[in-house]
């Protein structure tokens, strides 16, 4: 068994798709283009559906999505 097969996976199902569609419609209503953010919207949809917080270094990619518990993360500055 390879390592990825031992990791739990979140299924994408009708509930995920419903949340995704709602987020995409919201972005369109705001004048944004969801196509640029399609992968981020799927990730956000799964987090919302499963009640998970999303840890990300790309806070701006997920900011303003309703129902998403976002945890911004940054790497420490390198010491020189």
Image (cartoon, helix red, strand yellow):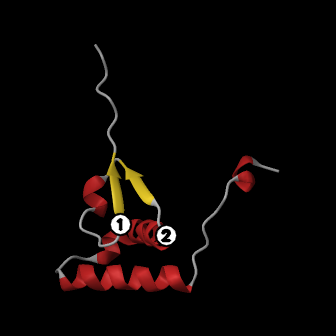
Q: Earlier in the sequence, mark 1 or mark 2?
A: 2
Task: Give the class, few, some or many, for how many residues have Cα within 10 Å of label 1's Cα (few <14, many ≥20).
Answer: some
Residue drawn at (44%, 72%), measured in percent from left and top?
Answer: 45
> For residue 14, which numbered disc appears in the image?
none
Q: Quadrant of residue 62?
A: bottom left
Instruction: Measuring from the top left, give residue 80's x and y in whole percent.
Output: 28, 13
Q: Please state the horizontal and vertical placement of residue 64, each as a whole percent of the image.
A: 24, 67
Image side of residue 49 versus residue 3, left or right: left
Q: Is residue 42 above or below residue 30?
A: above
In the depicted view, which residue is nearer to us: 33 or 6?
A: 6
Give the SS element for disc 2.
Answer: helix
**Outermost residue, left side:** 31
| Res. 60 image quadrant | bottom left
Taking the image as shown, residue 14 lies to the left or right of residue 27, namely right
Q: Residue at x 73, y 47 (%)?
A: 3
Q: Is residue 56 above or below residue 13?
A: above
Q: Residue at x 41, y 57 (%)?
A: 54
Tell me how far mark 1 sits from mark 2, CA to CA.
10 Å
Instruction: Look at mark 1 in the image and give the residue it sits on.
Output: 68
Q: Is residue 13 above or below residue 61?
A: below
Where is residue 53 drawn, in percent x and y?
Answer: 42, 58
Residue ID for mark 2:
46
Question: Residue 50: percent from the left, percent from the top?
Answer: 51, 69
């Amino acid at each position: 068994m390879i390592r990825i097969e031992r990791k739990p996976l979140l299924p994408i199902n009708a509930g995920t798709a419903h949340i995704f569609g709602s987020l995409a419609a919201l972005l369109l209503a705001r004048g944004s283009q969801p196509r640029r953010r399609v992968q981020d919207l799927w990730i956000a949809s799964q987090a919302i559906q499963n009640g998970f917080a999303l840890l990300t270094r790309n806070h701006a990619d997920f900011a303003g999505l309703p129902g998403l518990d976002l945890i911004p993360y940054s790497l420490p500055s390198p010491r020189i």
